[in-house]
Amino acid sequence: MLNENMKAIRKSKGLSQQELAVRLNVVRQTVSKWEQGLSVPDSDMLISISEALETPVSTLLGENVLVPEADDLRAISAKLEVINLQLAQRKGAKKRVLHWLLILLCVVTAAGFAILLSLESPYLGWDYSDPETAVLGVIFHSFEWLFVRIAPMILTGAVIGVFLTMKRE
């Protein structure tokens, strides 16, 4: 039990066998033998070990020593913090991309209206006796009719989306 306790306490203090040996003025192999249970330190050395490890002799001799969980909790907490930060960055990046896509949609919709206004429905003056012109006129008229009815809703939704995705300080 002494060997297990000594090893656990030494490791929890972040000491190597060599560092403990230097503190106790012994060779590293002596510390290794104690931790393997191949030999036992005398009473004076036991007191020196307890002082070097800043641990009561009773703890070294008999009480079970658990490796502190605080280090584990800190490590898990640090990992969770990194993960949360990464998720927040991804969410922010997605929000920025959506914001700029909505702005682009607003610009494209406004440009579509501007183009249609500048053309002033040229298909009405076309010669529909020519089959190619007639088909093209119907397609253009269908697009314009659909665009004029749907684009205001798209533009309104995009503008609202732009305001909702704006970065707030």
Image (cartoon, grey):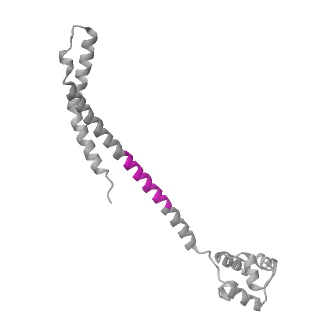
- Of residues 20 and 73, which is closer to you in this image? 20
Q: At x 21% / y 36%, what residue is drawn? A: 152
Q: Main secondary structure of the magenta part?
A: helix
Q: Residue at x 31, y 52 (%)?
A: 166
Residue 59 position by quadrant = bottom right
Q: Position of residue 106 (x, y in %)?
A: 28, 40
Query: Horizontally, is 162 left or right of 44 in the view?
Result: left
Residue 73 position (above or below residue 64): above
* x then y, percent, for residue 104: 32, 40
Q: Residue 32 is drawn in which quadrant?
A: bottom right
Q: Horizontal placement of 54 versus 19: left or right? A: left
* x 20%, y 20%: residue: 122
The span picked out in magenta is 82-97
| Residue 160 spot, x, y in % from top left | 25, 46
Q: Is residue 110 left or right of residue 57?
A: left
Task: For the N terminus, give its image quadrant.
Answer: bottom right
